[in-house]
Image: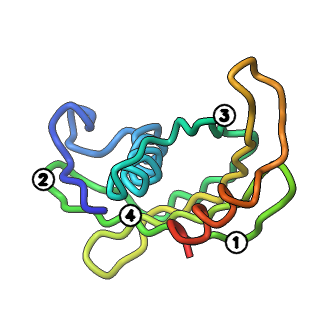
Amino acid sequence: MLITVYYEDTDTGGVVYHSNYLNYCERARSDAFFSRGMTPILSHGHFVARKLKADFLASAKLGDILEIKSELLKMKAASFVLKQSVFREEKKIFELEIVLAYITFEGKAQKIDTETKKLLLSLFD
């Protein structure tokens, strides 16, 4: 997914706020579903961030075009681990490792069914 850095994404010096990298990664995850005519809200539940590790390698600035790449690292019974990297041109500037838990609409953890596992593999593999 490509994202353009807008003025609202930056501080007065034109540098992207650190929290916006998380937003960019969230948009890329959602866009993976949207590109298939779906939403991240599935028929039996949805995913929420459980744990994350972020590594800020360099800064993006106003007007930059960023590419977000997502890679499925591990599938567990009720969660999966995704690595998302943000690139400016060919240089990696941010990396996120995130654990996403599958929950019911009432907020309880649930196992990822076979159909949803297949979907995740097709979206992020």
Where is residue 6? Give x, y as percent.
Answer: 16, 41
Work out which quarter of the rendered image holds the N terminus and state it: bottom left
Q: Helix, strand, or loop for circle 1?
A: strand
Residue pointed to by mark 3: 45
Task: Say which residue label 1 marks.
Answer: 73
Q: Are marks 2 and 4 in contact (CB under 8 Å)?
A: no
Q: Amino acid at mark 4?
A: Ile
Instruction: Give the foreground label among 3 and 2.
Output: 3
At a point 21% along the width and 31% down the height, the residue shown is 8
- Contact, CB < 8 Å: mark 1 with mark 3? no
Mark 3 burial class by Cα count in 10 Å: few <14, some 14-19, many 20+: some
On screen, 50 above or below 116?
above
Q: Identify which amino acid the numbered label 1 is placed on.
A: Leu
- Callout in the foreground (1, 3): 3
Q: Choose between 33 and 25: the one closer to the eye.
A: 33
Residue 70 image position (x, y, % from top left): 50, 67
- Mark pair 3, 2: CA separation: 37 Å
Q: On the picture, is 26 further left or further right than 9?
A: right
Which numbered disc, 2 or 1, marks the residue that appears first in the sequence?
A: 2
On the image, numbered disc 4 is attached to which residue? 68
How far apart marks 2 and 4 lie (CA) works out to: 16 Å
Give the spatial CA distance, label 4 vs label 3.
25 Å
- N-terminal of the pair, mark 4 or mark 1, is 4
Q: For numbered disc 2, what is the local secondary structure?
A: loop
Mark 2 residue type: Gly
Q: Dot 1: within a 10 Å radius of its alpha carbon, few (fewer than 14), some, or many (20 or more) residues? A: some
**In the figure, is residue 84 to the left or right of 23?**
right
Which tag, 1 or 3, sits closer to the chain's start? 3
Type of amino acid under label 3:
Gly
Q: What is the C-alpha distance between the residues marked 4 and 1? A: 16 Å
Q: Nearer the viewer, mark 2 or mark 4?
A: 4
Residue beneath disc 2: 63
